Image (spheres, rainbow, N blue to C red):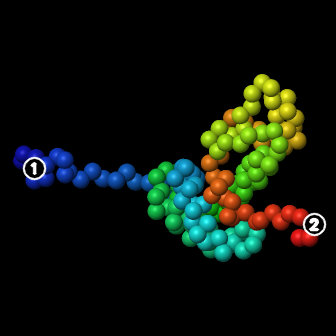
Amino acid sequence: MAPTRSNQPDSQAQTPEPSLPTTGNAAWLPADNKRFLTYLVEHRAEGGDGGNFKPVTHRAAAMHVNEIHKKGGPKTSKSCAQKYASFRKDWLVVDKIKNTSGYHWDDKMGVTVDDAMLGSWEEYVKAFPAAARFRNAGWPYYDLMVPLMPSKAKGGHV
């Protein structure tokens, strides 16, 4: 028996979607990060004044991010909570750098350290080791995180 050919032209032939893993570690792509943080900003009231979200919010965020899932295992409440904790730590480090006199922050390039400021930067990194990875490497999520972080009241009567 001769093989049959579909009546559809080749340009309309259906190609199956590649199946995505249903288990394994979540892989966080930049689009996932942005979608996750945007979701949290939209639901920031659920985080209270301290920006601490409950598992139910992380679970809903995971479902939201999984709608665009492209790589790795699916996001879970736990992986979202861990990612958010990591973002908060990074935000605090970047915020400290941005508010330190003598350093210029750029979301794409981080802190540009030239020969003239190398000694100063090395001293800074000794005091704040987490800052080291931001030398000449940016972090594009600072502005997205601002509404999620507790406000820093300043002044003598706060």
Q: Residue at x 57, y 62 (%)?
A: 38
Q: Residue furthest left?
A: 1
Instruction: Give the quarter of the image for residue 152.
Output: bottom right
Relative vertical location of residue 71 with respect to residue 146 in this rendering, above or below: above
Residue 26 pos. (x, y %): 57, 54
Q: Residue furthest top?
A: 115
Question: Circle 1 sits in a helix, a strand or a loop, which is it?
Answer: loop
In this rendering, position of residue 21 left or right of residue 102: left
Label annotation for residue 75: none
Q: Nearer the viewer, residue 115 or 16?
A: 115
Q: Residue at x 48, y 56 (%)?
A: 69
Residue 1 pos. (x, y %): 6, 47
Q: Amino acid at mark 1?
A: Thr
Residue 154 pos. (x, y %): 86, 63
Q: Residue at x 76, y 66 (%)?
A: 150
Label annotation for residue 156: 2
Relative vertical location of residue 68 with respect to residue 51 in this rendering, above or below: above
Q: Amino acid at mark 2?
A: Gly
Q: Residue furthest right?
A: 156
Label annotation for residue 4: 1
Residue 82 pos. (x, y %): 68, 58
Q: Check the picture and name the quadrant holding the C terminus.
A: bottom right
Q: Residues within 10 Å of mark 1 (few under 14, many from 20)?
A: few
